Image: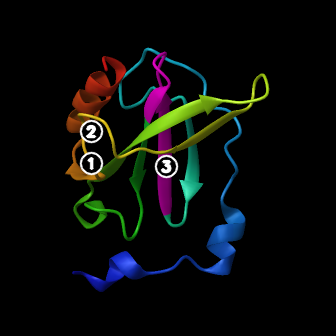
Amino acid sequence: MDERYFLEPTEEEVEEIEVITEVKITEETAFNKASAERKLYDGIQKFWRFKNNLGASVVKHRGSYGSDDGLWELGVLQFTPKDGEKTEWHLTYSTPITDDVLGYLSESQVEEVLEKIKNL
């Protein structure tokens, strides 16, 4: 396996990560219509959250599967509402979409997977 996937972020990179406290529900699956996004390490992370409390984290940064080719990595998210407006989220590996993350995705492939997640 490529050693870059085992690279730990630097302290500066970890300190620079914006904490996402709210990911709004959307019905949009267009790549340019993410519910939230932030800088992550040397790249970007985009979030989608759908009415079924599932969504996705889509990343492109050093170490993500496909970043060297300009492609994206997608993980399915489970959102859990807590204490009124606060919502927790975590990666879930127990959906029909995948039991892992999906790597090497083009923007149009990301949109196709987002549509499937929205319709679960």
* Residue range (magenta): 43-55
Dominant secondary-structure state across the stretch colored magenta: strand
Residue 115 picture location, percent across and down:
29, 22
Q: Amino acid at mark 2?
A: Glu
- Label 2: state its secondary structure: helix
Residue 113 screen position, x and y as percent: 25, 32
Image point (32%, 52%), residue name: 73
Answer whether residue 46 is magenta in the image. yes
Mark earlier in primary sequence (3, 2) = 3
Decide: marks 1, 2 in contact (CB < 8 A)? Answer: no
Q: Is residue 27 above or below residue 80?
A: above
Q: Quadrant of residue 80?
A: top right
Mark carried by residue 45: 3
> Residue 33 at x, y = what percent?
45, 26
Picture disc at residue 99: 1
Q: Secondary structure at mark 1?
A: loop
**Mark 2, residue position:** 107
